[in-house]
Amino acid sequence: MKIKNIILMVAGISALFSCSLDEYPYGFYSEKNFYKTAADAESSVNYIYDAINYIEYSRSIVFLGDMNTDVMSPKGDATAANKELDGWKLSNLNTNTTLGNFFKYSYITINRANSVIKNVGAVSFLDEKTKNRYVGEAYFMRGWSYFCLARNFGKVPIHKEPVTTLDMSAVPAASTLDEMWDFIISDLEQAVSLLPFYDKPETGRADKAAACGFLAKVYLYIASAKDHGAPQYSSMNFNVDDYYAKAVEYASMVVDNPEQTTYGFVDNLLDIYDVEKPDGSENIFLMSMDRTGESEGQYSKISKMYIPYISGATVYLRQGDSNDFIKTHDGWGEYRTDLDFYASFESGDKRHDWLFCNQVYNEGGNVIASVADGKLRYPFCRKFIDPNFAGDKTSTRPFLLRYSDVALIYAEAAGPTEKSYSLVNYIRNRAGLGELAPGLDKDSFREAVLHERKYELAFEGDQCYDLRRWNRLHTDITEAKAQGYTAEDLVFYPIPKVETDLNPNL
């Protein structure tokens, strides 16, 4: 079922109390008269997914995953919060509103997931298959949310029950990183055990492939962080090779599994990002936004963020190297491509030539603005384009997990095996590039995969986390290096001050 995130306020669910914890716990609602029907149960699952579509959360995917690296920058008059993140102004980050919203909406998602785990798991009116799916989705969303929190903040409070009173919110953070990550692994293992593989991708919903893919991502994240000596991760209590093997095991359930026939590579780069094909086989898990929605979050303005202001009118973009064109609005120029990154692609890489625009056209195919003539301020990313936009409303959606991401997870974790080479070479060949050098040793091969991730997953919210787990934030990010930060300084963001003020146990 495709979710359009128009969540109806059915009996028993009050409006979301999104104000601060001095009034209500995050995500609190009444359960007394709810969970009585199958429709109630499904609505409660939709309600979990709805929390990540709030613009304060969905935009933080870019600000925390890409904007704070050397692949992009904010516009000159961006908000102070986003400039602080981009410039790694550590002294200001405990009051940074973007980090505060990311933290808050993560816990809204977690609280809604906890309610489904507790209540849907206990109902008798659902058949076992449906109940397992709903509860599995809740475990997935809880595990995924804690994964996102842990890689940004490290040890955070673990809630296993719905928070319905203020005093229930004042729990301490996990005592160790091992406890934190073991909980995430346990949740995603539960999701893997309960969820089915879908017959076709369902936009905005997670299935077994999503759970396996993210569990592989978790194992790779902490294995590589310990392997590369990232502060605090280096003292975690697990064997690195065992966890790399676990990453391979779960990634192989997606990329090397005859029972998984729903997801796979898409041959044409432009088809991956075709807004009318959200159920394409690359899309294992992406947000569900649709231009028919009534408010932002239900619909998307993501394309406006990448495209610079041009003329205030409709412009046209060339489709690859063809003479076909699609239309788009122009934008606000919030997410600006770093020119050094743009220039760093290998010659002939279609991800550079096709997925960035350095000129735009009119309906007749004539150039009306370009970087060369100064009418475009920067070459902009066109992964998020909706030619059927309705004013500011689009169906452009963040990509949370693609098949190509899982393929690269497998390759990095497994090292230079025949299967790993075939996966990476497919991605490179699709981009118009030659194959990796044969016979690489394990370290060189993993380095090559990390390099490939930078270009394949650009603007999809991964670059900062890849640098963090490789212990390279302090060496590879210009702003951080210029300020002399150490790896210890950058391994985690501070927990937002509003949380530590309200929770005496943090």
Image: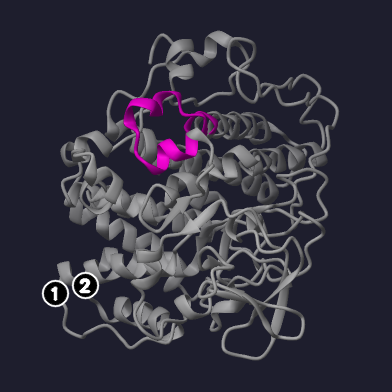
Query: Residue at the front extreme?
Result: 373
User: In this rendering, is residue 145 above or below 243?
Assistant: above
- Magenta extent: 81-101
In the foreground, 147 or 481: 481
Work out whether residue 223 can be spotted: no
- Main secondary structure found in the magenta portion: helix
Contact check, label 1 and label 2, Cβ < 8 Å: yes
Q: Which mark is residue 249?
A: none
Q: What separation in Å lies between label 1 and label 2 (alpha carbons)?
A: 6 Å
Check disc 1 and report the residue beneath it: 441
Give left or right: position of 252 versus 98: left
Residue 176 is one of the magenta-drawn residues: no
Q: Residues within 10 Å of mark 1 (few under 14, many from 20)?
A: few
Image point (73%, 78%), residue name: 362
Residue under the point 61% across and 11% down: 165
Query: Which quarter of the figure has residue 296?
Result: top right
In what element is the residue under mark 1? loop
Residue 357 image-quadrant placement = bottom right
Circle 2 residue: 445
Q: Is residue 459 left or right of residue 311?
A: left
